[in-house]
Amino acid sequence: MELKGTTISKQDIESGKVLFTRGDPNAHYTWDTGIGIGRYLEGLRKGKIFGTHCKKCNRTVIPPRVFCELCFSPNIEWRQLKETGVINTFSICYVNWDAQRVQTPHLPAVIEIDGATKGHGILHLLDEVDPKLIKIGMKVKAVWKRPEERTGAITDIQYFKPY
Ligand SMILES: [Zn+2]
C-alpha cells in the first residue's frame, strides 16, 4: 500500500530538519499496582481475566475495582471472566508512536470482555485479521503468551483475534 506524505526519519530528527525538543527528566519512580490491579495482573500471569461485580448495582467491570465507583460499596465480588469478547471500538493506525509510517497497521481496540457488563472492556490490540474486515461487534478471543513467558502484565495477552 502506498502511503501519502513524507516519512520522518531518525536522521531528520537528529539533524534538526524537523522541530523537536529534547529533555532529560529526573523521573525515578516506582509504581504500586495496589490490591485490585495487582490481583488482576496476577490473574493474567495465570491466564485468567478477572473483573469485579457489585451486587447492589448488578454491574461487572474490568479492570477490577476494590470498591464500586457508582455506589461506593466495598462489597464487591471477584469474578473470572471469559477470554472472549466483542469489539466496542477500534482504530487502524499507519503511524508508529515515533511518527514513523508503518506498512502493517497497528490495530488498537476496546474489547468488551464476555462476562463484564455491556460497555465495560479493556484497550488492547487486534491481530490475525484483515483490517478491512474489522467491525464493531466482531467476536474476538485472547491469544496468550506461553505460561513461562508471562510476567503479570496486560501484555501477557499478546492480542485478540476473531474466532
Ligand atoms: Zn455499586
Image (tube, rainbow, N blue to C red):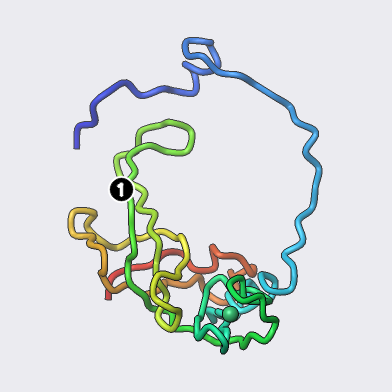
Residue 22 shown left or right of residue 97 in the figure: right
Q: Nearer the viewer, residue 66 or 24?
A: 66
Residue 152 shown left or right of residue 104 in the figure: right
Vertical side of 18 occupied by 68: above or below: below
Q: Tag 1: residue type?
A: Ile
- Answer with the quarter of the image where residue 104 lies: top left
The quarter of the image that holds ligand 1 is: bottom right
Vertical side of 5 occupied by 26: above or below: below
Pick the quarter of the image with the N terminus: top left
Residue 100 shown left or right of residue 16 in the figure: left
Q: Tell me what residue is drawn at x 61 percent, y 65 percent.
A: 153
Measuring from the top left, give residue 64's x and y in whole percent.
Answer: 60, 74
Measuring from the top left, give residue 112's x and y in whole percent.
Answer: 40, 71
- Answer with the quarter of the image where residue 139 lies: bottom left
Q: Residues within 10 Å of mark 1 (few under 14, many from 20)?
A: some
Vertical side of 108 occupied by 36: above or below: below
Q: Tell me what residue is drawn at x 28 percent, y 70 percent.
A: 162
Measuring from the top left, give residue 54's x and y in whole percent.
Answer: 57, 84
Q: Which residue is mark 1?
A: 92
Q: Is mark 1 within 8 Å of ligand 1?
A: no
Pick the quarter of the image with the C terminus: bottom left
Q: Nearer the viewer, residue 24 or 74?
A: 74
Residue 129 shown left or right of residue 73 in the figure: left
Q: Nearer the viewer, residue 76 or 159?
A: 76
